[in-house]
Image: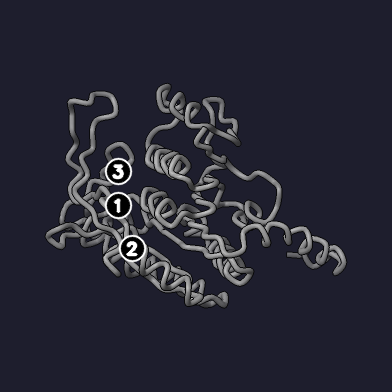
Amino acid sequence: MTDLLSIAPRDKAEILAQALPYIRKFHGKTMVIKYGGNAMTDPALQADFAEDVVLLKLVGMNPVVVHGGGPQIETALNRLGKKGEFVQGMRVTDAETMEVVEWVLAGEVQQDIVGLINQAGGKAVGLTGRDGGMIRAQKLKLVDSKDPSIEHDVGQVGDILSIDPSVVKALQDDAFIPVISPIGFGENNESYNINADVVASKLATVLQAEKLMLLTNTPGVLDKQGQLLTDLTAREIDALFADGTISGGMLPKISGALDAAKAGVHAVHIIDGRVPHAMLLEILTDQAYGTMIRSH
């Protein structure tokens, strides 16, 4: 903060002026942001995130936030004496776990995010996939990554059938910032827990977003030596899947990002949510932060 206060007014004006081409370029465009990791649990980073989202809205962009809540769900389950179990990056979700997921995501976590954005001067509205019939889902059939003949039962984990973005578009038109919990509903009104990265990627595709940004706890996609890969194509990602460089919780994140890039989302960025104002650095400067994924 001391460093910021020492910047001369003329230099501050120059910094703002340099952002103008990006503000002009992205004015009126939709930005889908997957919010998770440290950015979601560190109070200073939470405030930075909320300010970034409000600033993007005020300069004419349309941010849409999709949030996870893994650590918060894990804490709630531990309080109930339940231990989280994962298969290929997906949380195994029985009926009791699904209840916990709903009240943590659509209650505690979502309302915290809505409150932070409103406190920063925005007008956030919380939604789940049930609202406006947004996310229709079915039970996920999770095929084993090594043996396709094996199918894992992960309970009430959902596979998206369709997304109706009408309610999101209506809110955007009225200057609101949608904050979406990744919960879908099935044909018998059952609830499904859906990976937030997958929801963000599919929603970005349906909304024809300019950018999809996935905030993570890493600098981006790393190679086996731990070096950041700043620019990846579909073919390069397939090779990283095949040799095991991308595994675990990164699997659904990268798969969804690649699908979005192939389906017309102009730029998909996996960025380090531990960096203050990481989103503004990505959108309003010419510096590359994290990994950008291209369809070809």
**Is 89 in front, or is 173?**
173
The answer to whether marks 1 and 3 mark residues whose Cβ atoms lie closer than 8 Å is no
The answer to whether marks 2 and 1 mark residues whose Cβ atoms lie closer than 8 Å is no
Residue occupying the point 48% across, 27% down:
235
Q: What residue does disc 1 label?
A: 194
Q: What residue does disc 2 label?
A: 105
Residue type pointed to by label 2: Leu
**Is 276 in front, or is 281?**
281
Residue type pointed to by label 1: Ile
Q: What residue does disc 3 label?
A: 90
- Report the side of 221 relative to 152 (left or right): right
Q: Secondary structure at mark 3?
A: strand
> Hey, which residue is sitting farthest top in the picture?
243
Residue occupying the point 27% across, 38% down:
87
Q: Residues within 10 Å of mark 3 (few under 14, many from 20)?
A: some
- Report the side of 141 relative to 282 (left or right): left
The answer to whether marks 3 and 2 mark residues whose Cβ atoms lie closer than 8 Å is no
Residue type pointed to by label 3: Met
Q: Earlier in the sequence, mark 2 or mark 1?
A: 2
